Image: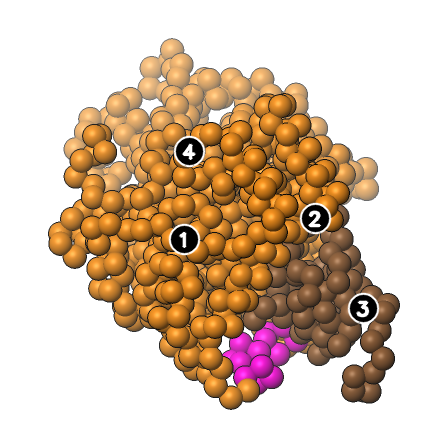
Chain colours: A orange, B brown
């Protein structure tokens, strides 16, 4: 209270996934939102402010959607810890808004039962009452209010209905803790009380905490009690006593809550007519979208459409950004004297950051599509369809979305792994995600294919390109299978997937999320990437050669990166590369497509682009000491294979570090991917030679 | 199709039901750390579950449980024993 006296009340908003929780959060807080991170974990913390009915300031905390307070993923752990008041810099909320889907109270009241155990005032936002009405359900609001003992606000959040009433309910001078609770079997109640007396952390929530500890699976218990052996013994003893009296400690609380839910539902829901066998809109759509034949067709069409948009539609804004970058660089060039500082600004800052920012349109389009697929409910169907294939390598359907996203860029893909409950499965997905060919590899493929087969038709070129994509996919699957059997061994992940009803997505919400992503991405481009670009620029420019008026190529050859290129030549020579390509490889660690512009610098080509004929002919003419061309078809192929498999993206390294909370995994990822890339390129080049190709 | 036939004492795995068929849960023996979550998603003893469809490749299976559609793999659904109704 003392630290922030202006906040009248801190409120958490929580509910099952797909209840319209985010819509309510956005409607209440508008643009007054802040996205951050919880300390020590990578779960996003989203807060916002709004004013109550009397102008008082309220802070609203958006908790990740979850089915239960019993913890099975990092997101769920955060929700629970916040509500128990365990998170260091997040005070325990003064009240919870429980968002429920009115058309499915049978299920959504389960979480409310757990909230009531917390002894925090709860306000029920009964969302989508219109859908319930359409399904022939009449909900007796007064009866619901009485059986829950909390205010119930009927809402249609997508149309803004009920918002004012919700604000009024939240602004009341006092909010009461409900006396209503699911009745536990006597034996269980006794154990809960006994354990509550031992746990004395937060006066209000001990009972809830005791229930969660008593009913968690053995596999997770040890992590939960976290080095408190006496507590562990206590819990085991209590569970044994429960088993002796014929109660399953895991099932008993669940059964008790659902029994309570059924009782409440029986008294508040009135069904008009017979709806149990009528097919809903969702049933009809699913008959097509999960059909053996049409389902695949729809799936492939949607994915194809998404990629066409990412690669074709994004081309315009990308060209604008590219143009703006060039314009800015020229502006600086015309106003600054030639010299190191101008080079730093033009090549290091503008070039370096521009090369990454140029991917913003693709990332935004990707997030727009992912948002549409997610909010409409199709994403769960994609996981349902793909699960069989993913399970072959020990992953599950939920890994599909992150891997798919990685075709645009591994960064959003890796961020999307947060929905995977099992840590090992999540890490396997993170480790293989960068093997999917991201859009930064495209310019490299484009120029190499142009060198490899200048006279071939577009179709043949597209075919080679497709092969590169498939190579990445195959490698990702093989490596995932390998990791699952070795370092990240875990029980076959379980698939427990809700297929929510289809809904019209709220575009406003999707656009707002895209905006958040853009801010995060640009902030990183302005900090980490900027710093890395400057460092790389220095490596490519210093130390300077002693000769007067050195050419760009001389500077590069003399620079730290150039020396490094020379130093690694013995390592890369078996792949068919010389030290100049080595410099390109080093530079491509900033972002893969930098390879193209660096090759341009090495060969003294101004403004090198993948479609630049000067650069291509210059590269074609490049000779080894013995007069044979450097860029033979085998070398080109070897370079492409290397780029498919190698980890050459500092931004990805940074995000993997953040998501896995350790340097171990990104370093391992760099090691295994680059080793894999080297071996594969070696096989291509040397194997090709043995077979008589050049 | 016999209505109200002799009560079947033999519980059968949920994975053995065909789309459209329904069963009442008797026991839940899903191995590992997700057993509780399966129950929390509504697969509790006494609940009636309907098989909606199989995924295009035959696995996983979509069920209707307490008004929601939940998907489980065959391997896990085999651990849930039901009485066909």
Whole-number angstrom distance, CA of label 4 to CA of label 1: 19 Å
Whether discs 4 and 3 lie on one chain: the answer is: no
Taking the magenta stretch, the answer to whether it contains residue A643 is: no
Count residues near mark 4 (Cα–Cα under 10 Å), then give few for <14, some for 14-19, many for 20+: few
Say which residue label 1 marks.
A179
**Residues shaded magenta:** A275-291
Which residue in the structure is indicated by mark 4?
A202
Q: Is residue A214 left or right of residue A447?
A: right
Disc 4 vs disc 1: which is toward the camera? Answer: 1
The foreground one among B56 and A278 is A278
Subunit ID for the residue under disc 2:
A
- Where is A362 relative to A690, above or below? below
Dot 1: what SS? loop
Residue drawn at x 20%, y 41% as measured from the top left: A7
> Which residue appears at 61% of the width and 45% of the height?
A188
First in sequence, mark 4 or 1: give its number.
1
Q: Is residue A417 left or right of residue B72?
A: left
């Amino acid at each position: 209270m003392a630290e922030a006296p202006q906040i009248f009340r801190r409120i958490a908003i929580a509910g099952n996934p797909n209840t319209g929780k985010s819509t309510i959060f956005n409607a209440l807080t508008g643009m007054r939102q802040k996205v951050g991170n919880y300390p020590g974990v990578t779960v996003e913390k989203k807060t916002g402010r709004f004013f109550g009915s009397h102008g008082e300031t309220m802070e609203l905390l958006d908790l990740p959607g979850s089915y239960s307070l019993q913890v099975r993923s990092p997101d769920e752990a955060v929700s629970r810890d916040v509500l128990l008041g365990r998170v260091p810099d997040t005070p325990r909320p003064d009240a919870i808004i429980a968002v429920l889907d009115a058309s499915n109270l049978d299920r959504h009241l389960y979480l409310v039962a757990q909230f009531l155990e917390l002894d925090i005032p709860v306000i029920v936002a009964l969302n989508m009452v219109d859908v319930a009405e359409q399904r022939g359900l009449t909900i007796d609001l007064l009866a619901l209010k009485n059986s829950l003992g909390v205010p119930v606000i009927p809402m249609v959040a997508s149309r803004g209905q009920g918002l004012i009433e919700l604000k009024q309910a939240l602004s009341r001078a006092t909010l009461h803790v409900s006396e209503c609770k699911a009745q536990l079997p006597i034996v269980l109640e006794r154990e809960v009380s006994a354990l509550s007396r031992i746990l004395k952390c937060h006066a209000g929530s001990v009972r809830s905490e005791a229930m969660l500890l008593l009913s968690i699976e053995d596999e997770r218990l040890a992590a939960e009690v976290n080095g408190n052996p006496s507590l562990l013994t206590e819990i085991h003893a209590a569970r044994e006593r429960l088993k002796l009296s014929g109660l399953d400690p895991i099932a008993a609380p669940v059964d008790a809550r659902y029994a309570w839910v059924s009782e409440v539902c029986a008294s508040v829901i009135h069904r008009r007519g017979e709806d149990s066998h009528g097919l809903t809109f969702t049933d009809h759509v699913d008959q097509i979208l999960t059909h053996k034949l049409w389902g695949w067709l729809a799936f492939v069409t949607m994915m194809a459409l998404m990629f066409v948009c990412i690669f074709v539609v994004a081309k315009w804004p990308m060209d604008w950004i590219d143009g703006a970058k060039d314009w800015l660089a020229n502006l600086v060039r015309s106003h600054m004297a030639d010299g190191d500082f101008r080079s730093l600004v033009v090549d290091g800052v503008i070039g370096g950051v521009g090369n990454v920012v140029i991917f913003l349109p693709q990332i935004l389009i990707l997030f727009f599509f992912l948002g549409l697929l997610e909010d409409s409910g199709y994403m769960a169907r994609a996981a349902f369809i793909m699960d069989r294939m993913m399970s072959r390598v020990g992953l599950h359907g939920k890994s599909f979305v992150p891997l798919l996203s990685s075709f645009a860029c591994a960064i959003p893909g890796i961020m999307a792994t947060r929905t995977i409950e099992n840590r090992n499965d999540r890490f396997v997905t993170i480790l293989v995600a960068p093997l999917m060919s991201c859009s930064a590899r495209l310019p490299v493929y484009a120029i190499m294919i142009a060198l490899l087969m200048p006279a071939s038709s577009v179709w043949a070129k597209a075919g080679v390109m497709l092969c590169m994509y498939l190579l990445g996919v195959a490698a990702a699957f093989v490596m995932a299978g390998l990791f699952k059997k070795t370092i990240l061994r875990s029980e076959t992940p379980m698939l427990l997937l809700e297929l929510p009803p289809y809904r019209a997505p709220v575009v406003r919400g999707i656009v707002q999320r895209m905006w958040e992503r853009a801010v995060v991405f640009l902030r990183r481009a302005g900090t980490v990437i900027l710093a890395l670009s400057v460092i790389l620029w220095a490596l490519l420019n210093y130390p300077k050669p002693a000769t007067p008026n050195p050419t760009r190529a001389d500077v590069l050859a003399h620079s730290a990166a150039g020396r490094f290129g020379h130093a690694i030549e013995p390592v890369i020579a078996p792949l068919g590369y010389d030290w100049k390509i080595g410099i390109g490889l080093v530079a491509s660690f900033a972002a893969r497509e930098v390879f193209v512009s660096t090759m341009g610098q090495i060969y003294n080509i101004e403004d090198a682009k993948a479609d630049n004929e000067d650069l291509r002919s210059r590269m074609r003419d490049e000779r080894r000491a013995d007069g044979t061309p450097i860029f033979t078809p085998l070398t080109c192929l070897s370079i492409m294979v290397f780029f498919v498999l190698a980890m050459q993206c500092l931004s990805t390294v940074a995000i993997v570090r953040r998501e896995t909370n350790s340097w171990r995994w990104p370093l391992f990822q760099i090691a295994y991917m680059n080793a894999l890339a080297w071996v594969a390129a070696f096989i291509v080049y040397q194997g090709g030679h043995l077979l008589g190709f050049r | 199709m016999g209505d109200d036939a002799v009560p079947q004492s033999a519980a059968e795995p949920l994975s053995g039901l065909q789309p459209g068929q329904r069963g009442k849960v008797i026991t839940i023996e899903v191995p590992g750390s997700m057993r509780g979550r399966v129950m929390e998603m509504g697969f509790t003893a006494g609940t009636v579950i309907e098989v909606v469809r199989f995924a295009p490749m035959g696995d996983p299976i979509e069920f209707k449980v307490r008004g929601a559609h939940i998907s489980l793999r065959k391997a896990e659904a085999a651990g849930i024993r039901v009485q066909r109704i």
